[in-house]
Amino acid sequence: MRPRVFVMAFLGVMVFPIKSNSIDINILPMVISIFNDPQRFTLVPMILAEILRSMTACIRGHNFFGGCSILLQIWAREHFYRRDPQMDYYIGALNKIESHKDRLQNWVGAPIGREEWRTFLNNLTGDAIQWKFSWVTGLAFARTRYFFFIELIGLRGIQPYAPLRVMRQFGVIQDIPLWSIMGSHESAFTSVSLERIRNLQAEWESIIDLEIGEESWCTPEYYAWRNTVSHMARPSAHG
């Protein structure tokens, strides 16, 4: 019983926090399922869903981040430190989170504090980003047969995610992506019908994946397209 209580407390505080500083009771059945059948269940899509939901909420004016902020910071710092991809093969072969600090130990001039980060991000350009991690290989989920995006099932709701817009992270050349407005697909579980759940199951059974490559660059057509749809960087209630 104690391991389950610890995992529930850890997830409630560090991974799926809520503004009241209490533990979300919805974590309990998830923890039970993981302990009963760890080979069948994974938290990865749910963690990503809540990070994306929280980032979108903050952009829209909310003042609380309900996702895993530590994991988001590790992910961001890894991308913001451009380095020789070969070095990653020899640092942290198994656990990339434990070895995060070792990989970034040579980052000279890394921003510290809010103002330095603000300046760093304001001056950041695409060629200064580590788009592709050398240890990321194999297949990546790209979309479903129904939509140009994937509907992630989070702890508190459904969050659409569009890998086709960030192909460089998968070592694939980024061209003008197939896309559609996703805002209408966001929903909290308080408003999800049984029919929607069945549709979600069908979508996940129709996932289309792609081979991860090594070419992390964009076509001129993509840059021209991005400039015409720059409003997508600030999500509204409609996508």
Image (cartoon, helix red, strand yellow):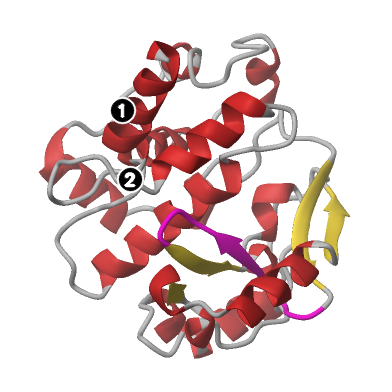
Residue type at numbered disc 1? Ala
Instruction: State the residue in front, 165 or 68.
Output: 68
Residue type at numbered disc 2? Ile
Q: Is residue 27 above or below residue 153?
A: above
Please give the residue where the numbered disc 2 appears in the rendered image.
Answer: 25
Residue 164 shows in this picture:
yes
In the rendered image, which quarter is residue 72 located in? top left
- Judge from the rendering whether residue 123 lies leftward or rightward of residue 218; answer left or right: left
Q: Position of residue 77 (x, y in %)?
A: 40, 35
Q: Is residue 87 above or below residue 179?
A: above
Instruction: State the residue in front, 34 or 224.
Output: 34
What is the crowding at mark 2: few (fewer than 14 residues within 10 Å), some, or many (at least 20)?
few
Residue 125 shows in this picture:
no
Please give the residue where the numbered disc 1 appears in the rendered image.
Answer: 9
Give the structural element (helix, strand or loop) at label 1. helix
Q: Position of residue 133 (x, y in %)?
A: 65, 34
Screen quadrant of the N terminus? top left
Q: Position of residue 104 (x, y in %)?
A: 43, 20
Q: Which residues are magenta?
A: 146-156
